[in-house]
Image (spheres, grey):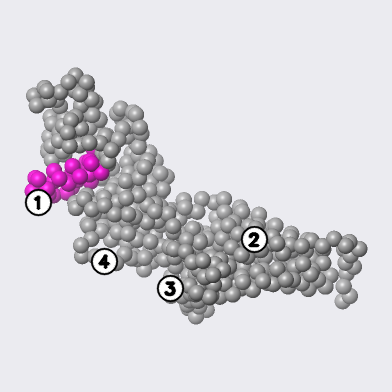
Amino acid sequence: MPPLSLPLASSHFTLDLSGVSCFFGGEEAISAMATVHLYEGRRWLGWYNCPGTFSFAARFSQMANTRVWDGLFPPKSPPPVLLGLGLDGKMGPNYIAALSGTMMHTGYLAYLAVKRSKEVKEVLIPGRLTNPINVAYLDMGPVDYHAPLKRLPLSRTPSGFVPMVISAVTCVMCALVYDWFSFSMILLGMAASGLATFVVGQGRLKIKEPIRNSAADPPPGVLLGEDTVLVIKGDEGGVNAITRGRFELDTDLQTKNKFDRGLQRSYSAVGALCLFLFTTQLILQLLLIPRGTLFGQIMFIVSLSASWMYNYFLSTFDREKIQAKLLFQTLGNPQMHRFCVGTRPMMAVLVCILLFDDVEDSCAQEGQDRRLGILNACLPFINSTRGVWKRWMDKVVEQLMSPDDVSLSRLTIGDEDRTLSETEKALLLTLLGDARAAFEWYLDNWTMYSSSNNNEAAKG
């Protein structure tokens, strides 16, 4: 078949893409590839000429974990495949173990748990309103650490066939005019993106089981965020999954498909393969695209533009929200409630009530120290060693240690408070009102929420 007449053949203008074609659209492309672990079957839809070759090469050089490429692409931490795909890198709030008072830093799963709590319907607790803050309650069950993370059906995401068809059409158009330079670059881009998406998608995300520590603090505990405080109770393994677990990409999961079973890859092997593809594409684009015809270069731009628009659309999805949803589905959808309180003292009291409502202390002094420690952790900027705040905390701790006192007799101003000035008495009365509001709501309403937790556990 003779070649078609070459459009724009009389033009002397050369569209030199070598300076930009490899570098733009990288973040959007990586964000789009991150969805490969969120949607079932997404790994089969990456066969299009994807922009951002340099960004891909940089990310996968870290995944390959070889010093050969460290000079061009400096290594980073944490594990680059998870960081690059938006599956790690953000720290969660500090975790306080209620029984021991130990404080520790948390990771990405705790961050997702707090984010997930903000999706739960809010219940407003009556009381004084100055600086509202959310108190969430999470009742964890056992966790199967061998189960892969759930995925959404592919119908939830727009079809990836559109950029694939456009890339294929532009590739064919270049072949029809015998522009083999542009043809080969579009084809290589399709192959590199498709293989990388397939290989990365071959693994399944799972929750990495924390190393068991005999000295580990048992639940319950609390995550102290800036605008949300999350009380976590329940099974110790489930609590550890949130506070100490992390995502890992398992490429050795057994599947029913024989072909899949033969594609077991480690992080380094996956990274090395993808690095080779994108580095080859990067170098050849710099050398060959300027030698293509103007029509071929336009076809190359069209394929990149279509792919970039598709990647940009995927990158607009709230991946963290999707990840939090899938995480909780994998954890068995543990029961969660969210309450809004109007003041931080009220928040601190409610947190203590929820943490210790079923805890048995070995001695009274131990129970007082535990509750006082949580109050201090929830109100870190308060001087609890003297003045009104000390009196208030002492009264709250006494009330917490007397669960049978439904009249809340400890939360009143007594003879021991006569030495306070009128201003101090007014402040103490206000703070005691916050504490009473938390206790009264708990006594009147918590049975309904605790019974729903028990019903869910019975169904499980």
Q: Secondary structure at mark 1?
A: loop
Say if 341 sits above or below 267 in the image: above
> Label 3 amino acid?
Leu
Which residue position is annotated with label 3?
A: 253
> Label 2 amino acid?
Phe
Distance Cα–Cα, label 3 vs label 2: 34 Å
Distance Cα–Cα, label 4 vs label 3: 22 Å
Mark 4 or mark 1, earlier in chain: 4
The crowd level at tag 3 (other Cα within 10 Å; few <14, some 14-19, many 20+) is some
Please state the extent of the stretch shown in magenta in the rendering: 349-377
Which residue position is annotated with label 4?
A: 212
Residue 79, x across and y down, in percent: 44, 65
| Residue 83 in view here | yes
Quarter assignment of residue 56? bottom right
The crowd level at tag 1 (other Cα within 10 Å; few <14, some 14-19, many 20+) is few
Which residue position is annotated with label 2?
A: 23
Distance Cα–Cα, label 1 vs label 2: 63 Å
Mark 3 or mark 2, earlier in chain: 2
Q: Which residue of the protein is positioned furthest toward the right in this rendering?
A: 10
> Label 4 amino acid?
Arg
Residue 124, x across and y down, in percent: 34, 34
> Label 1 amino acid?
Ser
| Residue 396 in view here | no
Residue 444, x across and y down, in percent: 23, 34
